[in-house]
Image (tube, helix red, strand yellow):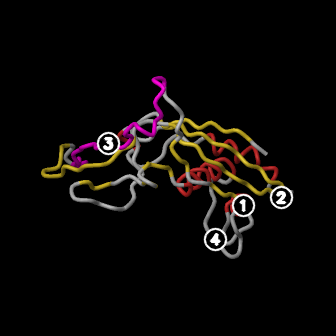
Amino acid sequence: MFLKKYNVSIEVQTPFNIASGEADGYIHKRTVRFRGKPYIPGSTIKGKVRSNFYKLTLPNHVDGICDCSACNIFGGQGYKPSRVYVDDFVLNDMPNDKGKSQEKKEFVFIRVGNAIDRYKRTAKHEALFITEAVRPAVFTGTITVYFDEDTLKYKQDLELAIKMIDSVGNGRSRGYGRVKVYLEEVT
C-alpha cells in the first residue's frame, strides 16, 4: 500500500449554493452549514473527482460488478471498498487585507430569482424563489488515497481529475459555483 495525502484548496470565484435539503419559511434552498459556517461536503468533491476520473479513463463505463480502474479506486458493487477518502472542505480563516479574519464577515446571503417557462421563454407566473448563497471564498480540505501496485499507475489521472473540478453546487447555468482548485501533495 502506498499512502498519498493531498492538501486541496478550492477558491470559489462566484457565489454558490449546496442545498441542505431544508426549507425554512420562504427560503427554498438553504446552504449546508457546520457550526454556523458554510462548507463543501467531502461527498460533493468525491463525486466530482469520480466523474472526472471516468471521463479521463473510462468514458463508456457501465455500472455493475467490474474490475476497472475507477471501481478499484473509488469502490464498486460487491465488496470493493473505496481507496479515496475526502474530508469536508471548511472555510479558510485567513486574515483579509484589512487585518480582520473572515470569521467575522457574513458569508451567507439571500438571492431572489424567478423561474422561467422554458417552452414559452418567459418568466413563470407566481414562481418567485429565494435561495441562500455563499460569497466567494477559499475552502480547504484533504484527500487521502491508498494506492496499490495496480492502481498506482492511475495517480496522475486522479490528480488531474481533482484539478478538473470547475464548479460546485447547483445553479451552474446561472453562474453559480465557479471554482479554481489548487492541489499540493503532502506525503
Res. 46 mark: none
Q: Which residue is mark 3?
A: 109
Residue 148 placement: quadrant: bottom right
Kind of residue indicated by mark 1: Arg
* Structural distance between the alpha carbons of marks 3 and 2: 45 Å
Of the image marks 3 and 4, the number of the one nearer the N terminus: 4
Residue that extends furthest to the bottom in the rendered view of this protein: 78
- Quarter placement of the C terminus: top right
Residue that extends furthest to the left in the rendered view of this protein: 125
Res. 64 mark: 4
Of the image marks 1 and 3, the number of the one nearer the N terminus: 1
Q: Up-down: is 65 above or below 31?
A: below
Kind of residue indicated by mark 3: Phe
Q: Which residues are magenta?
A: 97-119
Of the image marks 1 and 2, the number of the one nearer the N terminus: 1
Q: Which residue is mark 2?
A: 148
* Structural distance between the alpha carbons of marks 1 and 2: 10 Å
Q: Which residue is mark 1?
A: 83
Q: Secondary structure at mark 3?
A: strand
Please tell me how crowded label 4 is: few (under 14), some (14-19), or many (20+) other residues with Cα within 10 Å: few
Of the image marks 3 and 2, the number of the one nearer the N terminus: 3
* Structural distance between the alpha carbons of marks 4 and 2: 22 Å
Q: Are marks 1 and 4 in contact (CB under 8 Å)?
A: no
* Structural distance between the alpha carbons of marks 1 and 4: 18 Å
Q: Are marks 1 and 2 in contact (CB under 8 Å)?
A: yes
Q: Up-down: is 122 above or below 94?
A: below
Which residue is found at the position 39% from the left and 48% from the top? 17
